[in-house]
Image (tube, rainbow, N blue to C red):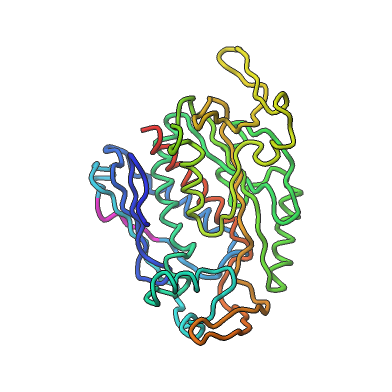
Amino acid sequence: MSIFGKNIRISLFGASHEKYIGLTIHGFPAGIEINDDLIKKRLKLRRGLNHLTSKRFETDEFSFISGVFKGFSTGAPLTVLVENIDLKSADYEKTYGLARPSHADYTQHIKYHGFEDYRGGGRASGRLTVVFIILGALCEEILVKRGIIIASRIESVYNIIDRKKSLELNHLLSLKEEVFPVISEETKIEMLDLIEKTASVGDSLGGIVETWIYGLPAGVGSPFFDSLESYLSHLIFSVPGVKGIEFGSGFEITKLTGSEANDMMHFEEGIKYYSNHSGGINGGISNGNQVYFRTAFKPTPSISKPQKTINFLKNESVEIEIIGRHDAIIAIKGLHVINALTNYAILDMIL
């Protein structure tokens, strides 16, 4: 399914090696200025660190073909197109039938009875997330004016962990403008060094992204199926490479007693909390505390080391070495996609 949303509905189209990828947005409010500079800035962050990410170079030139007039949204369906220009489709013709381990080659072949577009992963490619960045920037323009700020950091790469820190507004404003946001500069250097070393031997790494929502008022979300957690999780799990999500203390909360885990409250110029193990959410509804969650990205499955797999066209076991333009770690780009989709989810839920 390529359609999502309640108040603002989105329809995703295109594939990794088709001429265009795009998004149609239904229900986007009229009269919102289309901030091209913000969109370009967010797209540039997603493309950052080219020496560690895919060598496929896309300029991400975008154009709105409906729903925009004189620089403002009209309230009509808003459609944006992004052209794919740096294509090497022939690479995939040579390997069709080989199931790249932990890719969607085999599952898409079964699902679509052999009619799938297998070039570059087709519809399952992370390339499509570029239009999520545009969507997120459009929503960010509205949320910032309401005092809602969303930002993330790389919490860990492999076994290197950034230091724990309660993030305040000034931290978030800084992190949201960084390509590779990490609190400790020393840890960032360690992470980048490990990523480069791993890439040099043809392997890849995973990572955990921590996301914070500042300024979200109490009352957003609705039990059961539209809880804040379930709505965010639905979107986050749509990002290629995501394998887990946890809110607040997550699985670690099982190591606490109720008296330790409960977020006690008091009045101090409004309602305040002594802790935030619940991640700012109770009963599926925001409680006024900062909402935060962590997203786990698997290691990039495209690696150049020999791997055992199958040729599903010939029904035989084979060995494969994946040659091509691939990210050493997808969590870097993934972080900016998480920010974008979180902006969208929050705006959709508060309208």
Determine the image quadrant of residue 326: bottom right
Q: Is residue 323 visible?
A: yes
Q: Is residue 52 left or right of residue 343?
A: right
Residue 103 locus on image (x, y percent): 54, 69
Is 176 located above or below residue 59 in the figure?
Answer: above
The residue nearer to you, when weighing 192 against 37, is 192
Is 118 located above or below residue 28 in the figure?
Answer: below
Quarter of the picture containing the C terminus is: top left
Residue visible at 61% across and 78% down? 309
Residue 63 magenta-drawn?
A: yes
Quarter of the picture containing the N terminus is: bottom left
Residue 190 locus on image (x, y percent): 76, 55
Q: Is residue 175 visible?
A: no
Q: Is residue 160 left or right of residue 57?
A: right
Residue visible at 75% across and 52% down? 160
Q: Main secondary structure of the magenta part?
A: strand
Residue visible at 67% across and 62% down? 205
Determine the image quadrant of residue 137: top left
Image label count: 0
Q: Is residue 194 left or right of residue 348?
A: right
The residue nearer to you, when weighing 109 against 147, is 109
Residue 58 locus on image (x, y percent): 46, 66
Residue 278 locus on image (x, y percent): 61, 31
Determine the image quadrant of residue 128: bottom left
Is 151 located above or below residue 192 in the figure?
Answer: above
Range of magenta residues: 61-66
